[in-house]
């Protein structure tokens, strides 16, 4: 019963990780298409007047687009999380249906993979959160523009891209990434508990085997002692 509960908890966490990763992949892919391969993360720019004689900010000008690697890394990390969560969810569900418990080696490898994904998704989440904040600071000039970052997606920034949904896309992506990170963190904790349980169980089995050997060796020693005693007599 305890094994089934543990496997069920793992299966639920893997399903959540899969779901949240899917929530990340879709908006990031859409944003890459809308921005024609450009990455808005860490983008630098400012509002400039279209007419230099008029002291009004009318158009946002990008000084330097963000590094494409930032968006690609976040997307690839989400895809990796998606695929691994799906594979492990299927395997855990198989174990749950069969009532089978994986080996110590499998549990240890699962712990290593989970810890790696936790680190990877955390880096991706940080990149998206910090990079998107820098974009919003640039496009709103840190709040001096009369429009918020969310409202600016309804305004054509004339950047030769489709910016009609950038805020919604990255808001969803941020939520999905951090939620996915929490799911993988829970998976890692469960994997650690599994390894610890298996390690203690193996120690217990070794102790039982040792005790069995001692018990079996006891009668043999007594018989040998009696034979030696008889020989002396």
Image (cartoon, helix red, strand yellow):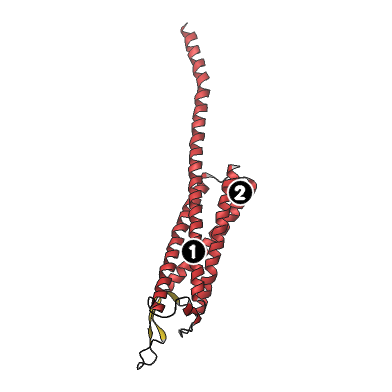
Tag of residue 20: none
Say which quadrant the N terminus sits in: top right
- At mark 1, the secondary structure is helix
Gap between marks 2 and 1, in whole Å?
A: 28 Å
Estimate how packed mark 2 is, as few (under 14), some (14 to 19) or many (20 or more) residues with alpha carbons within 10 Å. Answer: some
Which sits earlier in the primary sequence, circle 2 or circle 1?
Answer: 2
Against 42, residue 86 (above or below) is above
- The answer to whether residue 44 is left or right of residue 36 is left
Q: Nearer the viewer, residue 8 or 92?
A: 8
- At mark 2, the secondary structure is helix
Estimate how packed mark 1 is, as few (under 14), some (14 to 19) or many (20 or more) residues with alpha carbons within 10 Å. Answer: many
- Across the whole image, how many numbered discs are drawn on residues? 2
Q: Nearer the viewer, residue 10 or 82?
A: 10
The residue sitting at 52% across, 72% down in the picture is: 29
Residue 142 position in % (x across, y down): 38, 75
Residue 61 position in % (x across, y down): 40, 84
Q: Nearer the viewer, residue 212 or 14?
A: 14
The residue sitting at 60% across, 55% down in the picture is: 90
Q: Residue furthest right?
A: 97
Q: Which residue is mark 1?
A: 177
Residue 226 position in % (x across, y down): 50, 12
The residue sitting at 48% across, 67% down in the picture is: 174
- The answer to whether residue 48 is left or right of residue 99 is left
Tag of residue 95: 2
Q: Residue furthest top?
A: 233
Against 91, residue 222 (above or below) is above
Mark 2 against mark 1, which lies toward the viewer?
1
Q: Is residue 36 visible?
A: no
């Amino acid at each position: 019963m305890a094994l089934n509960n543990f496997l069920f908890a793992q299966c639920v966490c893997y399903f959540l990780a899969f779901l949240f990763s899917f929530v990340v992949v879709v908006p990031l892919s859409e944003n890459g298409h809308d921005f024609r391969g450009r990455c808005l993360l860490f983008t630098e720019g400012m509002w400039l007047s279209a007419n230099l004689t008029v002291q009004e900010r009318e158009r946002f000008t990008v000084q330097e687009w963000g590094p494409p690697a930032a968006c690609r890394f976040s997307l690839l990390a989400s895809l990796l999380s998606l695929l691994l969560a799906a594979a492990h969810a299927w395997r855990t569900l198989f174990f749950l249906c069969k009532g089978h418990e994986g080996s110590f080696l499998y549990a240890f490898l699962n712990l290593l993979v989970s810890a790696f994904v936790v680190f990877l998704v955390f880096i991706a989440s940080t990149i998206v959160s910090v990079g998107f904040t820098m974009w919003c600071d640039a496009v709103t000039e840190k709040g001096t523009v009369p429009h918020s970052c969310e409202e600016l997606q309804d305004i054509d920034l004339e950047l030769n891209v489709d910016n009609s949904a950038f805020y919604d896309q990255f808001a969803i992506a941020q939520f999905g990434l951090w939620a996915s990170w929490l799911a993988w963190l829970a998976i890692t904790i469960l994997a650690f508990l599994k390894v610890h349980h298996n390690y203690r169980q193996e120690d217990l089995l070794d102790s039982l085997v040792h005790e069995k050997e001692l018990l079996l060796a006891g009668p043999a020693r007594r018989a040998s002692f009696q034979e030696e005693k008889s020989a002396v007599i």
